[in-house]
Amino acid sequence: MGDELPGDLEALAAAARSSPSDAGPAIAALLAASRERVYRWALVRTGDPDDADDVAQEVSMALHRRLHQFGGRSRFSTWLYRLAANAAAELHRRSRRRSEVHGLASDETVTAAMDERIAGLPDRRIADTVHGFFAGLPDRQRELVDLVDLQGYTAAQAAEMLEIEPATARTHLFRGRRALRERLLETYPTLREDR
């Protein structure tokens, strides 16, 4: 999540919105604070660091152009997430069209953040296993596990960002966590707590 907490991003957005339109420092601070977060969201959606970088750049430009359109009816992070999700979806559509023309496809779906967490596990075999399990989760479950367990958003905030009902978000989050745990315990039964 970087050094900025979700609430700090909200405060930076409020400061940038209340600044005169030609005031660069407030916008610059907001862009700098949101860049890593947008990159991470994009990486979860695209699975490719280069694509995530492209999405983050696109969102930075859109944020600079469209900050005045944010009406404050939702959290700024929700609005920003939708910008990132839409940019990632558009990139995916363009990429799919190119892939169809060139006959190419990509399977990469694991985030750099998950890679870092997994690399910190003491046993490399377990790390490789968890990495594979995370990659194998359905997209929605992977997004929610990343937003809630790795980035620190609440399930309700993640639901708002993904534009789904909170109960649906909690269900996907529960299923994702359960799938990761079950797969890990199937592979490494010695990790069971009841032993």
Image (spheres, grey):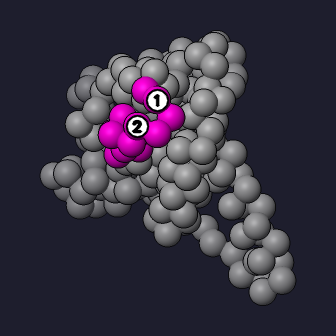
In the rendered image, the vertical position of residue 40 relative to residue 14, given as above or below: below
Q: Is residue 44 visible?
A: no
**Residue 165: percent from left, percent from top:** 69, 16
**Residue 163: percent from left, percent from top:** 68, 25
Q: Residue at x 39, y 42 (%)?
A: 24
Amino acid at the residue labelled 1: Pro
Q: Determine the image quadrant of residue 143.
A: top right
On-image quarter of the C terminus: top left
Q: Main secondary structure of the magenta part?
A: helix
- How many residues crowd around disc 2 within 10 Å: few (fewer than 14), some, or many (20 or more)? few
Considering every residue shown, the one lying at the far bottom of the view is 102
Number of numbered discs visible in the structure rendering: 2
Magenta residue span: 19-34
Foreground of the two, 186 or 49: 49
Amino acid at the residue labelled 2: Ala
On-image quarter of the N terminus: top left
Q: Is residue 164 left or right of residue 45?
A: right
Tell me the SS state at disc 1: loop
Query: Quick check: marks 2 and 1 in contact, CB under 8 Å?
Result: yes
**Residue 96: percent from left, percent from top:** 77, 69
Tell me the SS state at disc 2: loop
Residue occupied by mark 1: 20
Foreground of the two, 32 or 186: 32
Q: Residue at x 72, y 81 (%)?
A: 104
Magenta run includes residue 167: no
The numbered dot on residue 23 is: 2
The numbered dot on residue 136 is: none
Foreground of the two, 10 or 106: 10
Considering every residue shown, the one lying at the far left of the view is 122
